[in-house]
Structure formats: C-alpha cells, structure tokens
Image (cartoon, rainbow, N blue to C red):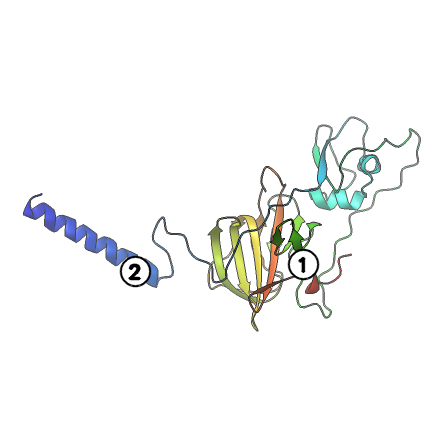
C-alpha cells in the first residue's frame, strides 16, 4: 500500500470510529449492532394457538359456525376482529379459538338467536394496577410449561390490532430481540415494568412518554405454530409476575 493509501485508510478508519461514538452518544447502535434491553430476556416457549381454522360455506352464519365448534359468537367475533357478527362472506377464513375439531352441526330448523355485537371489556377504573393492552382471547397463561417457564400471558387478536400501554410510563426499550421479535418495554415507576412482544411494528421509540391506553405497537402475524397474538409480561422489581394479578377480571 502507498503512503497516500495508508493515510486514506487511517482517515476512513478514524471517521468510522467517530461515527460509532456519535451513534452511541445519540442512543443509536451502529448498523448491525443489536440493542440490548435493560432487563434479562430468556426467551419463552412458543405456545401453539389452540383453535381451528374454518372456511365459511354457503348458507352458514356465525351462530351456526359457533354451534358447530361449541364456541360463542362473541369469542369468534373478537378473535377475528368482526364488529358486525352478521357480515361474513363465503370463502372467508375464520379462526375459532379453543376449538379442536368440529362437533355435529346443529339440526336444520334449529332457531337462531338474533346476533349481538361482541361485548368489549371496559377500561378498568378500579383497584387493578394495569389495564388490558388489547381486547383478545387469552389462550396461554403464566407459569410452568414443560421444563421451562412461560413468563407472561398470550392474547390472540387479529394481525395489525393496536396494542395499548397498560399504564402511564416511559419507553425503556423498543426494538428487536431473538425469541421475542419486535418488542416494547415500558417503565411505570416503583420497579414495575411491562413487556409487549411479537409485534408487527413498534409505534414508539426509546425514551418516549406514554399514557395508559396510548398506542405503542401492532399485533404481529405470529409463527407457523401460532397465529397473531401479543405476548405480555409484567416485571415487578424486575422479577416476572403473573400479569393476571395486575389486570382487572376479564369480562
């Protein structure tokens, strides 16, 4: 290498070093460097979404489909983001939560009740410390799963559904982590953290202030073994806790 080439190489190296320092000071990791979250994330066993997929046939209604699988109209509507239970189309694919296989279809002529819109859990105003981050179907709880622990709960919901902050707080981390995908970590003070994972996209950035109910992310598409869902964790003193102990009773 010539003397001029050596000087150019040192100059480029110095510029790269300065850029890395500048990015670090700005809170942005250099390209190719993954941010490290402020709490230890061990990953978690990916639960299989319990349910069945159903393709709407001519003449079917949501009520008859629900009767076939033994699942209520409200549960099917919530799991599929249907605001009007009367509006389904032939060929439409529906996820039936909690259904393993079809039961015998209701007999022809069975009276069908008038459909009602699904009941939405109101935002809690009582003693619960947190609010539900979204309206969905709870299909995996906190606790032991085989030889590992599931450190949160899983809520199935249509892909793209808004995930809301469970309480006022500050964004400690918004980014990608192996085993969690895109996730957001919120600090609510007094050692209480909440974690929202498997997101389609994060809508907030590190350091942002959020209020309870503010949009922070969207539900992702899930994996080959599970459908769209939110993995939600609560850390109290950075120790994983059962989120259901901090949330109001689901209705």
Residue 95 visible somewhere in the drawing: no
Horizontal placement of 143 versus 18: left or right?
A: right
Q: Earlier in the sequence, mark 1 or mark 2?
A: 2
The residue furthest bottom is 190
Mark 1 Cα within 10 Å, few/some/many (few <14, many 20+)? many
In the rendered image, the quadrant that contains the N terminus is top left
Tell me residue 63's x, y (percent): 83, 38
Horizontal placement of 143 versus 7: left or right?
A: right
Q: In the image shown, does 134 or 17 lie closer to the viewer?
A: 17
Mark 2 Cα within 10 Å, few/some/many (few <14, many 20+)? some
Q: In the image shown, does 89 or 216 lie closer to the viewer?
A: 216
The residue furthest front is 147
Q: Secondary structure at mark 2?
A: helix
Give the residue at mark 2.
22
Give me the residue at 30% from left, 60% from top.
22
| Location of residue 51 by image quarter | top right
Q: In the image shown, does 124 or 245 lie closer to the viewer?
A: 245
Q: In the image shown, does 216 or 35 lie closer to the viewer?
A: 35
In the rendered image, the quadrant that contains the C terminus is bottom right
Tell me residue 124's x, y (percent): 72, 64
Tell me residue 55's x, y (percent): 72, 30
Check whether the beta carbons of the residues at disc 1 and disc 2 lie within 8 A of each other.
no
- Looking at the image, residue 19 lies above or below residue 113: below
The residue furthest left is 3
Q: Secondary structure at mark 1?
A: loop
Give the residue at mark 1.
132
Residue 204 visible somewhere in the drawing: yes
Report, in whole angstroms, how far the alpha carbon at label 1 lies from the one at label 2: 39 Å
Give me the residue at 82% from left, 46% from top.
116
Q: How many marks?
A: 2
């Amino acid at each position: 290498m010539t003397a001029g080439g050596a000087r150019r190489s040192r100059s480029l190296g110095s510029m790269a070093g300065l850029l890395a320092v500048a990015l670090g000071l700005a809170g942005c990791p250099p390209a190719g460097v993954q941010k490290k979250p402020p709490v230890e994330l061990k990953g978690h066993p990916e639960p299989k979404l319990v349910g069945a997929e159903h393709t709407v046939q001519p003449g079917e209604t949501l009520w008859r489909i629900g009767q076939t699988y033994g699942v209520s109209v409200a549960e099917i509507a919530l799991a599929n983001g249907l605001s009007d239970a009367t509006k389904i189309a032939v060929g439409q694919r529906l996820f039936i939560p909690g259904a393993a296989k079809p039961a015998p279809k209701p007999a022809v002529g069975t009276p069908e009740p008038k459909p009602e819109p699904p009941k939405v859990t109101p935002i809690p105003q009582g003693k619960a410390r947190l609010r539900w981050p979204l309206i969905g179907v709870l299909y995996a709880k906190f606790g032991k799963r085989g030889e590992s622990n599931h450190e949160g709960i899983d809520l199935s919901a249509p892909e793209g559904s808004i995930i809301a902050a469970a309480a006022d707080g500050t964004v400690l981390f918004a980014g990608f982590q192996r085993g969690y995908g895109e996730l957001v970590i919120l600090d609510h003070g007094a050692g209480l953290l909440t974690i929202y994972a498997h997101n389609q996209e994060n809508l907030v950035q590190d350091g942002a202030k959020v209020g309870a109910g503010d949009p922070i992310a969207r539900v992702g598409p899930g994996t080959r073994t599970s459908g769209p869902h939110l993995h939600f964790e609560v850390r109290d003193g950075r120790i994983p806790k059962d989120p259901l102990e901090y949330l109001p009773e689901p209705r």
